[in-house]
Image (cartoon, helix red, strand yellow):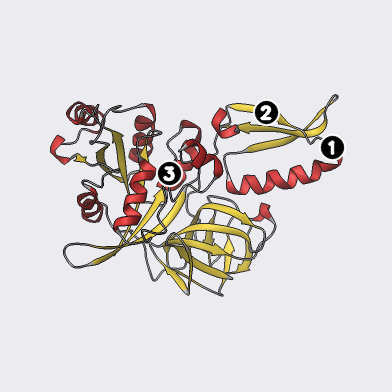
Amino acid sequence: MIRNFSIIAHIDHGKSTLADRFLERTGALSARDMRDQVLDSMDLERERGITIKAQAVRLRYEHPNGQTYTLNLIDTPGHVDFNYEVSRSLAACEGAVLLVDAAQGVQAQTLANAYLAIDAGIEIIPVINKIDLPAADPDRVAGEIVSLLGVDPAHILRVSSKTGEGIDELLERIVEEIPPPAGDANAPLRALVFDSYYDAYRGVVCYIRVVDGELSEGESVMFTATHERHPAAEVGVLTPRVEPVSELHAGEVGYLITGVKDIGRIRVGDTVTTDERVEPLPGYAEPKPMVFSGLFPSDGEDFEHLREALDKLRLNDAALVYEPETSRALGFGFRCGFLGLLHME
């Protein structure tokens, strides 16, 4: 009983606050542990009040019909600079909540993210947020959503992430309208690496979506891009705390640690499998940088340290591109490409 979904929206339309309400309503965190923007962990995210990195969290939801469902929420950024993060998140989902501000209406990133979801072929649940605002005009915004998606106006939910109004109905709709993951539990393992980061103690940590088969702790797994085998030292889920489990099944979202310290060996978009004859999952289109900047160490001896830092950053941010360059004035450094100014920051 699994549902995998993302929340997509224009920047500052209340996406992280809605994620907080989901965590609260499903009991994922106690009232004592709750803080604003729980899924926004980077300093810049909390400082700017925006989401930059995709985060995955498992929620346990008890439906009014008496059944218990596992909801995997994959949070996404709303800024245009981080479209690549959004497309990666959607590849791991069967549905998306399209959130629109009741005062601002449909904005540029609303359109861009809606088209990403349509291209991904996933179910879209349109939702008008911030209906508690004095400037809210949900009827006008509903008309804009109808023009965008061609849905019945009565089908558009109206909620307030701040007050919690309409959140329970939205959770019910997620279960009822987003299809369960389609995958063959008896087939050989195929899992998509949709994000990763580097941990100084445990090495590369991969966020994965198991598409077929199951992944068990301790078994030997292969990354299809390099054909290298490594033991699955630890597998688990985020609730949002890290919780190791013995195995992950088809349709589930979690993390995988293989103990790999060499950053270049694991790529976002790669397929994890146990059978080398398995056909890899389709990866991601390479992002195109729009803004370029030269990075040079203040001390020439730190060149290799800078390269190492960029390698680790690249693991956590697959949209970053860089190549060595030389300057007569500054010495050896790197020419870096970013998706936009905020991405560069």
- Looking at the rendering, in which quadrant would you find the N terminus? bottom left
Q: What residue type is labelled 2?
A: Ser
Residue that badge 3 annotates: 76
Residue at far front of view = 32
Q: Earlier in the sequence, mark 3 or mark 2?
A: 3
Crowding near pointer 2: few (<14 within 10 Å), some, many (20+)?
A: few
Q: Can residue 340 be seen in this view?
A: no
Q: Nearer the viewer, mark 1 or mark 3?
A: 1
- Between 139 and 177, the one lying in front of the other is 139
Q: Which of marks 2 and 1 is nearer the N terminus?
A: 2
Residue type at tag 1: Asp
* Element under disc 2: strand
Separation of marks 1 and 3 at Cα, in angstroms: 37 Å
Q: Give the spatial CA distance, label 2 vs label 1.
A: 18 Å
Compare marks 1 and 3 and give the one earlier in the sequence: 3
Say which residue label 2 marks.
Answer: 293
Q: In this view, does 337 lie to the left or right of 173?
A: right
Residue 343 x/y as whole percent? 56, 34
Mark 3 residue element:
loop
Residue located 71% across and 46% down the image: 309
Residue 327 in percent (x, y) is at 82, 26
Q: Residues within 10 Å of mark 1 (few under 14, many from 20)?
A: few
Amino acid type shown at disc 3:
Thr
Which image quarter holds the C terminus? top right
Find residue 299 and name its label.
1
